[in-house]
């Protein structure tokens, strides 16, 4: 007796299109073509180890395993992030895959999603300096443009070599100092997700819940486009709030998106605060580096419109909103008071509380000096 093979469900995103679009936007900038690249792997290995210790001592967040540095080119960064996105969307794909096989616009929708994803990844591949990817698998997945075997393992923090080199050259940064400063920021994110036991699962559950409420009905696309046209007719940018995602969101999804935005603002703001405070103590020239990166985020013109369309402007605001919140908590209480945020999902600040640190401190009872309960 022979069994009938199970048909493979289609992805909601055409990942081949996403990869092709991203690579075209990223442009070839092979890491190995630069003689300056020789120092990257050794330097990032060194500063990653240093930064991990500095972050643990400053924040009290100690990762259970040691971090490893991976240096890659833009193409490998794109490949790694396409793989991560596929893993993140896998449960969503299983849920709506059958519906995607029906209907005349299913292929168009997948192409549209793939193009949008490719634009996002291609644009970001030219700007991102470092990244801790909480979605990597346990087993190593080495990209073709990576310079060592740690590039996409679960303990890896990876750095996009061409982008680092470009900024160092353009602004005459001291390479080792600039690389240490970048490493501090990324190791702070790694500490957040590895030293706070529940945070990774909570973040991924928010993403799953948001995707779980997505309606793939083509009529939703039509209504979203109609809303966009109405906004444009009134002189408003339809992407101002949350990019393309915001166009398609219903009320329940917007509530979930606000929770994701609040969490990301806290994480980005906390990362920036730690980066800058430790930078003052351990990085020569940190003030100029900070000014350059701040100006780099304040893009206008066509790039600014792309940021709005893809929802990146909200991410850029997250740095500012989150860091203002952290500094307000430090001013009202002390840095250790932030430990209350890592106690449970219920203790995370809301979007409203990010603008009113006293409200959050009162709610979680953290106005008094907090204990370092997370330090190992």
Image (spheres, rainbow, N blue to C red):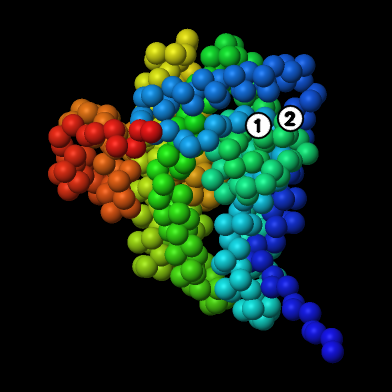
Q: Report helix, strand or loop for mark 1.
A: strand
Q: Is residue 359 visible?
A: no
- Residue 252 or residue 170, whichever sits in front: 252
Q: Position of residue 155 (x, y in %)?
A: 58, 38
Name which residue lies at 65% across and 62% down. 13
Q: In the picture provided, is 311 more to the left or to the right than 339? A: right
- Which label is found at residue 147? 2
Q: Is residue 283 left or right of residue 142?
A: left
How many numbered marks appear? 2
SS class of the residue under badge 2? loop
Q: Residue at x 69, y 16 (%)?
A: 39
Extreme residue toward the front, this view:
376
Where in the figure is residue 16, as x and y percent of width and height?
74, 56
Which residue corresponds to mark 1? 70
Q: Quadrant of residue 4?
A: bottom right
| Tag 1 near tag 2, CB within 8 Å | yes
Name the residue located 67 percent from the left edge and 47 percent from the top edge.
139
């Amino acid at each position: 007796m022979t069994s009938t093979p199970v048909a493979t469900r289609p992805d909601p995103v055409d990942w081949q299109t996403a990869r092709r679009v991203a690579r075209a936007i990223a442009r070839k900038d092979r890491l190995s073509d630069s003689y300056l690249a020789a120092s990257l792997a050794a330097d990032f290995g060194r500063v990653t180890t240093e930064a991990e210790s500095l972050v643990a001592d400053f924040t009290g967040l100690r990762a259970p395993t040691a971090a490893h540095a991976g240096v890659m080119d833009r193409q490998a960064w794109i490949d790694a992030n396409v793989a991560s996105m596929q893993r993140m969307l896998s449960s969503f794909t299983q849920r709506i895959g059958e519906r995607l096989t029906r209907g005349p616009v299913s292929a168009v929708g997948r192409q549209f999603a793939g193009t949008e994803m490719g634009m996002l990844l291609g644009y970001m591949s030219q700007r991102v300096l470092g990244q801790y990817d909480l979605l990597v698998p346990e087993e190593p997945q080495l990209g073709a443009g990576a310079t060592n075997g740690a590039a996409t393992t679960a303990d890896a923090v990876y750095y996009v070599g061409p982008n680092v080199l470009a900024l160092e050259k353009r602004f005459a940064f001291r390479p080792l100092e600039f690389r240490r400063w970048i490493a501090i920021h990324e190791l702070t994110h790694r500490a957040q997700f590895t030293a706070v036991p529940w945070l990774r699962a909570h973040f991924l559950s928010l993403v799953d819940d948001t995707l779980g409420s997505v309606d793939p009905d083509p009529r939703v696309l039509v209504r979203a486009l109609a809303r966009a046209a109405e906004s444009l007719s009134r002189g408003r940018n339809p992407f101002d709030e949350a990019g393309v995602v915001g166009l398609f969101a219903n009320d329940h999804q917007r509530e979930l998106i606000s929770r994701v935005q609040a969490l990301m603002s806290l994480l980005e703001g906390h990362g920036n605060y730690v980066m800058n405070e430790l930078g003052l103590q351990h990085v020569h020239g940190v003030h100029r580096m900070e000014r350059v990166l701040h100006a780099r985020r304040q893009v206008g013109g066509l790039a600014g419109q792309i940021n709005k369309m893809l929802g990146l402007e909200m991410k850029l605001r997250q740095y500012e909103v989150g860091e203002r919140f952290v500094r307000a908590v430090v001013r009202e209480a002390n840095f250790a008071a932030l430990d209350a945020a890592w106690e449970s999902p219920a203790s995370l600040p809301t979007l409203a509380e990010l603008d009113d640190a006293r409200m959050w401190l009162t709610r979680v009872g953290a106005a008094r000096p907090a204990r370092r309960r997370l330090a190992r």
